[in-house]
Amino acid sequence: MDRRQGFTLIETLVAIAIIGVLAALTLMAVQAARESARRLQCSTNLRQIALAMNSYLDRDGTLPTAMMRIYGETRAYCESPFARVLPEIDQAIIYNAINFETHQPPHVIAAENNTAASLSIAIFLCPSDALSAAPGTGAMNYRVNMGSGYESFPYAMEPGQPGPFALAEWIRASDIRDGLSTTCLISERLRGDGSPLIWTRDRDPWFSGLGRLKPAPSTDAAVQLCTAVPEGVPPHYSFGGATWFLWSYDKTFYNHVTPPNASTPDCATTNEYYGSHGASDSGIYSARSHHGAGVNVATADGAVRWVKAGVATSVWRAFGTRAGGEVISTDAF
């Protein structure tokens, strides 16, 4: 008698389930490998930018200022530190196309610099930020560290809070008294979603208006006020990181007030009218990424390291100051 062997229905279903599990595991492994590659590319970008900052420091004796001001003149020179180091990252052609002598306000690019500023520069983009870069904006994923306070002028900060970059100040290596290897120079931040009608919590700072309070609140009080988000869609800025060319917290600054990828939302101290121009010079703007539980940072000596999102706030703030006098253990990260 001819008896043909075959699979039962149960055996077939079990085999399909096993194949499905294996496929899911394979997909997870592929996705993890891809993110690992993207994170490595982001780390490489940061290192190149940090080395460019160090080359500028070696040549000029200071880091590039976060906003140039010439006393006695009424003109502003609000190009970002990134614009100043373009030759050091093999972008001399773009650098030479910029007119650094023209009046450059903080919220709109001068007409003669529009073409150069709109160019996309690959080293300024982190591949883990899947948000599509708006065309003609020169989008930016990296930010310079302004310190552990929510202001950008050192005189307005609490003692020990200023970072390695400051408005209208040129910081020398000797000014970074906490040590080059334990002072954060640059980190990453997610770009805005580009939609004023949608508030994306980890991308869009909201306009808290806390800058109108007199006297100015302490850093910790500002964090509490920033956390008090109104119901619905709060007034917010949706175009963060839209250009590498200009200074401001909305474009190329961040600070160490709250830890990386903080659950506390970011906020500008300005109100909706002023903040909508994208020229906030104070606020709580955390380092943020989509790498997982942490961010890449570059220290003032040009090294790149990974900092976990769970790092203690006190350690993160100490890592953000240039002369706070704190002692940081590398085990804290």
Image (cartoon, grey):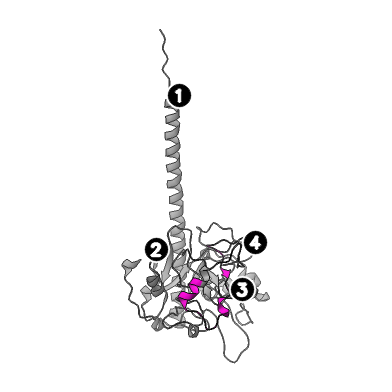
Q: Earlier in the sequence, mark 3 or mark 4?
A: 4
CA neighbours of label 4 inside 10 A, class few (<14), some (14 to 19), many (20+): few
Determine whether the residue tagged by mark 1 lies in a helix, strand or loop. helix
Q: Distance between the Cα atoms at labels 1 and 4? A: 52 Å
Callout 4 amino acid: Leu
Instruction: Point out the stretch of residues depicted in magenta.
Output: 202-224
Q: Earlier in the sequence, mark 4 or mark 2?
A: 4
Residue denoted by label 1: 9
Q: Are marks 1 and 2 in contact (CB under 8 Å)?
A: no
Quarter of the figure with the N terminus: top left
Residue denoted by label 4: 197
Please give the name of the residue rendered at 63% of the width and 88% of the height, measured from the top-left corner. Answer: 74
* Residue 279 vertical placement versus 38 (above, below): below
Q: Nearer the viewer, residue 71 or 273?
A: 273
CA neighbours of label 2 inside 10 A, class few (<14), some (14 to 19), many (20+): some
The part of the image, by quadrant, that contains residue 234 is: bottom right
Q: Nearer the viewer, residue 32 or 272?
A: 272
Residue denoted by label 3: 275
Please give the name of the residue rendered at 52% of the width and 59% of the height, measured from the top-left corner. Answer: 129
Residue at far bottom of view: 72
Q: Earlier in the sequence, mark 1 or mark 4?
A: 1
Determine whether the residue tagged by mark 2 lies in a helix, strand or loop. loop
Please give the name of the residue rendered at 62% of the width and 66% of the height, measured from the top-left corner. Answer: 137
Callout 2 amino acid: Gly
Q: Are marks 3 and 4 in contact (CB under 8 Å)?
A: no
From the top left corner, tell me how far across and down residue 287 is, in percent. 47, 67
Q: Are marks 3 and 2 in contact (CB under 8 Å)?
A: no
Residue denoted by label 2: 310
Residue at far top of view: 1
From the top left corner, tell me how far across and down residue 193 is, in percent. 59, 61
Q: Earlier in the sequence, mark 1 or mark 3?
A: 1
